[in-house]
């Protein structure tokens, strides 16, 4: 009788160990899958502006022959299609998060996002001031490119800055990357650095441009930390849109002075 109990306990322990091993393997598999999905989204986001040109070339159409308004319209259509595509992929999570965020407690739901955005903003401003001092008033190449595009295509850039970027970037840099890591601090750091790095690396013209990874990453880290606290993507989308809105307003005010 005693021997049977020992045997039963031994078999139970083996089953538990096998279950733990299977759970770990499933966890690793899901993390690898999440990493591949995130990497795919990041690559797609980085090269999407070239895809329409390739598509046109396949049909023997030269984008350079388009009129100014035609180029803007075509660019907007392509951006909208990408936006619709990523929203469709994450539609279930977006619907659930929207119901939770935009409810009767909407104002209170903004408390955490606003608090951490302000922290990120202060770090961003401080680091930008420091970089500006050591570079004699220079600005990031990415920022310079954005300003030039606003002057060239103001309506398109308003859509890009206020709607397209907050939604696509938060779904990619916050939502998709979150599924890779069990450790929230590793996720926060990775999300912030990837977010900041891609904003800088895609438009590097001098070695000092790399310094701007710090201010961009500060904001990305703040958004990632917010997401771990709320587990609601609209908490970061709303702050990203607010930040971009204020930046755009300040830009236009500066132009009018």
Image (tube, rainbow, N blue to C red):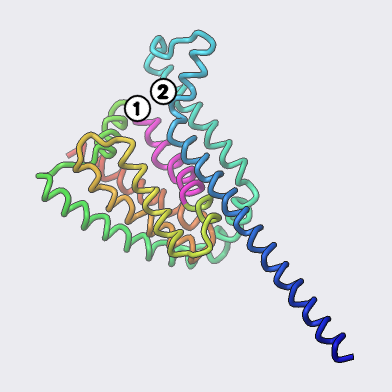
Q: Write down the residue under mark 2.
A: 72
Q: Secondary structure at mark 1?
A: loop
Q: Position of residue 71 (x, y in %)?
A: 41, 19
Q: Which mark is residue 153?
A: 1
Asked if residue 105 is positioned above or below residue 243 in the image, the reply reads below
Asked if residue 108 is positioned above or below residue 127 in the image, the reply reads below
Q: Position of residue 51 (x, y in %)?
A: 48, 24
* On-image quarter of the C terminus: top left
Quick check: 192 left or right of 137? right
Quick check: 207 left or right of 2? left
Q: Residue at (48%, 10%) from the top-left corner?
A: 61
Cα distance in 3D space between marks 1 and 2: 7 Å
Camera-side residue of 171 and 99:
171
Q: Secondary structure at mark 2?
A: helix
Quick check: 83 left or right of 222? right
Residues at circles 1 and 2 in contact by the CB criterion of under 8 Å: yes
Q: Residue at (55%, 44%) from the top-left corner?
A: 36
| Neighbourhood count class around disc 1 (C-alpha, 10 Å): few under 14, some 14–19, many 20 upward | some
């Amino acid at each position: 009788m005693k021997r049977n109990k020992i045997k039963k306990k031994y078999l139970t322990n083996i089953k538990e160990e096998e279950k733990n091993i299977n759970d770990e393997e499933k966890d690793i598999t899901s993390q690898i899958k999440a990493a591949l999905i995130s990497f795919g989204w990041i690559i797609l986001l980085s090269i999407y502006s070239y895809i329409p040109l390739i598509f046109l070339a396949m049909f023997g159409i030269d984008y350079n022959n388009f009129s100014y308004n035609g180029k803007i319209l075509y660019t907007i259509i392509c951006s909208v299609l990408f936006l619709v595509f990523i929203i469709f992929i994450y539609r279930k999570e977006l619907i659930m998060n929207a119901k939770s965020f935009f409810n009767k407690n909407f104002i209170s739901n903004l408390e955490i996002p606003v608090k951490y955005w302000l922290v990120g903003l202060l770090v961003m401003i401080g680091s930008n001031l420091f970089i500006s001092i050591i570079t004699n008033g220079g600005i990031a190449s990415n920022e310079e490119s954005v300003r030039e595009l606003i002057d060239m295509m103001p309506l398109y850039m308003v859509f890009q800055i206020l709607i397209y970027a907050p939604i696509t970037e938060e779904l990619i840099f916050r939502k998709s990357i979150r599924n890779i890591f069990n450790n929230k601090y590793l996720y926060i750091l990775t999300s912030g650095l990837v977010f900041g790095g891609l904003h800088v690396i895609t438009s590097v013209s001098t070695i000092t441009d790399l310094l701007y990874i710090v201010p961009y990453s500060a904001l990305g880290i703040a958004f990632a930390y917010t997401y771990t606290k709320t587990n609601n993507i609209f908490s970061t989308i709303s702050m990203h849109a607010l930040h971009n809105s204020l930046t755009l307003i300040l830009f236009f005010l500066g132009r009018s002075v």
